[in-house]
Image (tube, coloured by chain):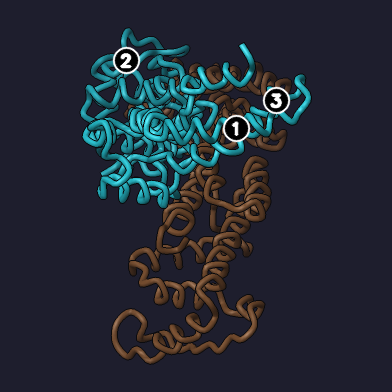
Chain colours: A cyan, B brown
Amino acid sequence: MPFGAAVLTSYSEIDFRAKPSSTSASNRSCFLKRLASGRTFDFFGLRSRIQARIRRGPFCCKRLIMSYSIAMDNEALKKEIKGLLEIVKVCPPALQEKCFELLFNHRFGQVKKMETIEEPGSGSDDKPASSTLPTETAKRIKTFADPHGLSQEAILKVFAVGESGDVSIEVTDLKTKKTSRQQRRLALLVGLRHQLMEGSFDVPTEELREMCVTYSAYDAPNFATNLKNAKAIFAGYKFGGTNKLSPRGKAEAATLIKELTT
Amino acid sequence: MVEDVENFLVSLSGLVDEIKRNKAELVSKQGLTTNVGSTCKLWLNRISNSLRAGGGVEEPEINGIDAIFEKLLQLSSSPNRKSTYIKDLNLARKIIQKAVLIPLIKANRTSPPIWQGVASKITAHTSAEEKLYYDEAFAAAKAGCFKAAVVMTGCAIVDRLRKLVLKKGLPQFNKTSRQLKAATKGYYSKFNKEFDLKIENELQEVFDKDLVIVVSGMVALDLNQTKEILHLLETRNNCAHPSAYIADELAYAHFLNEANNLILSNPKLS
């Protein structure tokens, strides 16, 4: 099969998914205007499907728009690709594929950017934190937040998530002055931090001690006693080493997040 | 080592409680004095030596604690006042926690500093030029120089406000300053400066406090936010001059968080 024909038969399989970050407020408003006017998207009854997907989330919506834009401008695209192939023919055969790829990316890379859409209600400068979260961390946040009736935003107010999935406690005010209570709260936050980072509710004693020092909540003679008094939040408490949060500890951690973010 | 010292502090607390429970004014019970003696020997013969060998704690601090336990060891050889024991034991407890235990924990730290999370958020809002400045501030914080980091971050946020003024134009800045000066009631009634800046670099001559007040008027910033920004400037100034002000890791994390929320990610100031 000649190169051009192969391209024409397979171009619809090209993955047009856009990066979640390549969005902007102007693109979004542009899309919404087009959607509202019905000039562009009034084919195939897809408007309602797009609206439904907007509600479901940005990623679903982006994929649909991309696939839809291909279907919508099918004839126009064929013409454009034929035009590109005319140019490609000028090149030596060995370079034709590369040349086509470059021209294609140059032409449709722009389209891709223009037709990307963001979830309504979020600005380009103030992107939802979830869009930049590593997938695993986003999943873990959801797994913890949903059953406890927490919003993702609330968790992200207390924890900062790095690009590589490292999580750190961000809150500086534990909203209590009592050292033992501060220590208990830090234990809950450390456990939750490990859950978001590694998927375990681990509370390493050493790390807890460090956090207590940082938050000026370290009372060395009573550190072990405070921990023992808070053993209900740990599953099978043992001093030293690593403990895990118990179901009660997890529930308490969720309550703490609510308290710290209100 | 940390756990050994921590356990030692627990035993010291127990000893203090035991002495407090002693009904007589003088500590003369043999059991009690023996306990004091063995605790002192534990420190002097074992823990002190391990700390010297392990490093991470200043030598003069260890010497100071050694001196307290040597004194206590002498006291335990004859009946002495309860209050003297309690005073010295409490002093030793305080010094051990502050000068031994906390430096040891900090030296062997495994968790990331808490300001790092906010720092990564801040760098997402900054230009390449600003990022270089913030990177230097974060390097200072990494080295434990939190006052330097606060000053650098504070200057960077003022620079952001200057850029905002330049974006909106000097005439608007001048006009707002005139309007605020003319106000006779309300928050701005005490503001009595009027600017007539013609060239962009003249903006550097405007005091930071005046800049914040005029900018707040320009963008109709929430008054609570304005007050908090002024508080940030005050914190920066406190860190810039020798004083008893303490800027630790938590204070820096708080400063960064406030700077991010109030200025860098504030839609009115972008």
- N-terminal of the pair, mark 3 or mark 2, is 3
Which residue is at 58% across, 86% downward? B197
Say what secondary structure mark 3 lies in.
helix
Alpha carbons under labels 1 and 2: distance apart: 58 Å
Which residue is at 46% across, 36% downward? A76
Q: Which residue is mark 1?
A: A104
Q: Which residue is mark 3?
A: A98
Q: Which residue is mark 2?
A: A234
Label 1 neighbour load within 10 Å: few <14, some 14-19, many 20+: some
Vertical arrangement, residue B99 with respect to residue A1, above or below: below
Task: Indicate the position of residue A235 as horizontal and vertical percent values.
Answer: 31, 10
> Disc 2 marks which amino acid?
Phe
Q: Are marks 3 and 2 on the same chain?
A: yes
Alpha carbons under labels 3 and 1: distance apart: 10 Å
Say what secondary structure mark 2 lies in.
strand
Which residue is at 63% across, 50% downward? B131
Label 3 neighbour load within 10 Å: few <14, some 14-19, many 20+: few
> Disc 1 marks which amino acid?
Phe
The label nearer to you, 3 versus 2, is 3
Label 2 neighbour load within 10 Å: few <14, some 14-19, many 20+: many
**Mark on residue B216?**
none
Q: Quadrant of residue A100?
A: top right
Q: Chain of mark 2?
A: A
